[in-house]
Amino acid sequence: MTTKMTSRKILAPQRTGPCLCLRKNFKRIIISSVVFVTMVTLIILSSTDRIPKLTWQTTSASDRSCLSVTQRRMLAESIMEVQRNIAFLAGTNSTVDSKWAMQLESIASQLDLRLRSRQHQSALLPDMEPKNKQGNGLSHVCHEVYFGRKYDKPFNQHGMEIQKCDYAPPLSDVITVILPAQRWSNQRIKKVLTKLCNLYRVPVIVLAHSSTTFTTSLPNVQVALIESDTGDGKALNSIISTVGTPFTMIGHSLVTFSNQSSIERLVRVIDDLPHVQVATGAFRDEEGHWSHGCLQQKMLNYRAKFKYGYYYSKYECMYCDMSLGPFVTTTDLLRRVKFRENLTGTILYVDWFTRVRNAGVLGMACPDVMFFVKTTTDLTKQDWGTYAKAWELQTITDHHGVTFQYQCGEVGLTCESPFDIIGSFLLPPCCLEIVTKEIEFLVDFLEENNMEYELRDGTVLGATKFGSYLPWDFDVDIFINCKDKDKLLREGEKYVRTKNCTLEIKKSYYFVVHCKYFFYEFMCHNEISNRFLPKEYQSHPTSIYYSGRWIKVIANPGLFSRNNIGFNDLRHAQHWRHLVKNKNAEDRGAYKNPGSWKPCSRPGFHACLDQYPGDGNLPFVEL
């Protein structure tokens, strides 16, 4: 069976198995479930009543009832992503992320093409009457009409045309333009102002260095002098408090202004799509390099990664997590999510977009709007370092694929008191590196001295789940054969001192190596577990690939973990010392509710344990 796919699809999944043909009733049940989940989410979290609309790829008209295996898997993953986000927030007073509603509606539109026909378009057709009322009040700008693809052949510089109307206020009452020009030359300031004011009669505020000699007699232009020791963020926050219009444009990095930089278009996008509060355009630098400027961001486990591109679109604009060019936003949002006062330059805006996205607000980049900027932004390791410190990140991969690494001390992280850290957070990578090297250091000693040993308890649980140290543990459990105890105590004490560690004898069979941050518990037994292996394998103890090398563990680590932890041992929970003991939990094993986390002490922080699913190891390593 073959299926005709339309040329406009964003994705073109290949057939990897039989086509699943869904009956109409079953499809409608799925759609009803998606809508129900959306409504329940909004009711439970009760933060907003604005539900975004978006379309995604659908099957062609000739194949409406069939979904390929690839498409089904994509839909399932999208639903599960929303489900995971809802699951750990359900029952709390939290922010509804606009992206969830957008994803759910896009899933519904894939299952029923009729939903697509109900979506509003970005412009009217010539025979359509405008609707000047929006869900959030009057339109702030006049509507556009699309006159067709032949309207301005062959260059198509026109087609979507703004119409005159009597319902929109003057643009001067709608938007204020702020130009952060502290490091601009007088000539550049003059050029941008002249071009801008020739096109738009709107209030403009120029942030200029206090030593500037620039003056202007242009109407509606205010020059605010900024001292050299005042950060860009602090200067912007101060001046935004004086803005009297509902929208603000931050015109950073501009070198000129033209009629291709349509302010009305960006205001209209925010007007028409209530879940969108930031709109930007493409940008072109002085070398002629063009970029749509739409970036996606993911921040997890002390790492951040930026990708150039988009997953969703509407109104011929891309949904973005951030952009590196000039942008329009609501003045209210700028006052609610302030710029970080100690940051300066482009990284200031990267940081602001990150906090806007964390607040559940969406932005869009409309590539038909083109700004002219000084240079295409390439941030250095030093630039990213200020961002890494602000967000406590050890690794940043930028949108060019370049990765920057930072040490714990450079970004304000510490490995002091691992036990306190794991109450809410994953251990930072630098701490995992320390404990891994110390495990290797001790294992080297044991193996060089032909001592029988094996990892046990929580350490073998980490080895089973992750092939590494469990990132919410704080000690290490090692069992040895008691016949090697005297040698370990005699030779081991001198050995561990070379790493500034100490060896303490707790009991005749129990001793502890204390290092700077972590400690290592040794228990001796008259036998170790290799006796449970078939006789022919007892001389070859079981090893597991652990952080890049083979290390000996209990004979059957999976069986040990299942019997030691009990039900659902592969699911996750905080270290047992951070949980209240419960008789029911003890009867069932080690944990009452495996697969769930305690609420984080810093809600929303990227290293919070409750940011992760309670099951699976890949979410902790993928980004």
Image: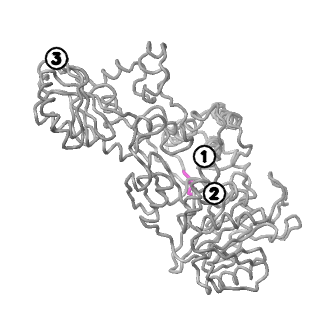
Type of amino acid at the residue the image marks with label 3? Asn
Residue 339's x, y, as percent? 62, 60
Q: Nearer the viewer, residue 600 or 6?
A: 600
Pointer 3: what residue?
Answer: 526
Residue range of the region highlighted in magenta in the rendering: 5-9
How far is mark 3 from mark 2, CA to CA? 64 Å
Check disc 2 and report its element: helix, strand or loop.
strand
Q: Position of residue 284 (x, y in %)?
A: 56, 75
- Bin the neighbour count of mark 2 within 10 Å (Cα to Cα): few under 14, some 14-19, many 20 and up: many
Give yes or no for residue 451 being in the magenta stretch: no
Give the CA distance from mark 2 to mark 1. 34 Å
Residue marked by disc 1: 62
Q: Residues within 10 Å of mark 3 (few under 14, many from 20)?
A: few
In front of the other: 454 or 8: 454
Mark 3 or mark 2, which has the lower sequence index? 2
* Number of the label disc, if any, that sits on residue 368: none
Q: Which residue is at a point 74% across and 54% down the rendered structure image?
A: 120
Q: Which of the marked residues, 3 or 1, is nearer the chain's N terminus?
A: 1
User: Circle 2 is placed at which residue position?
Assistant: 363
Whether residue 235 sits left or right of residue 13 in the image: it is right
The residue depicted at 38 percent of the width and 44 percent of the height is: 415
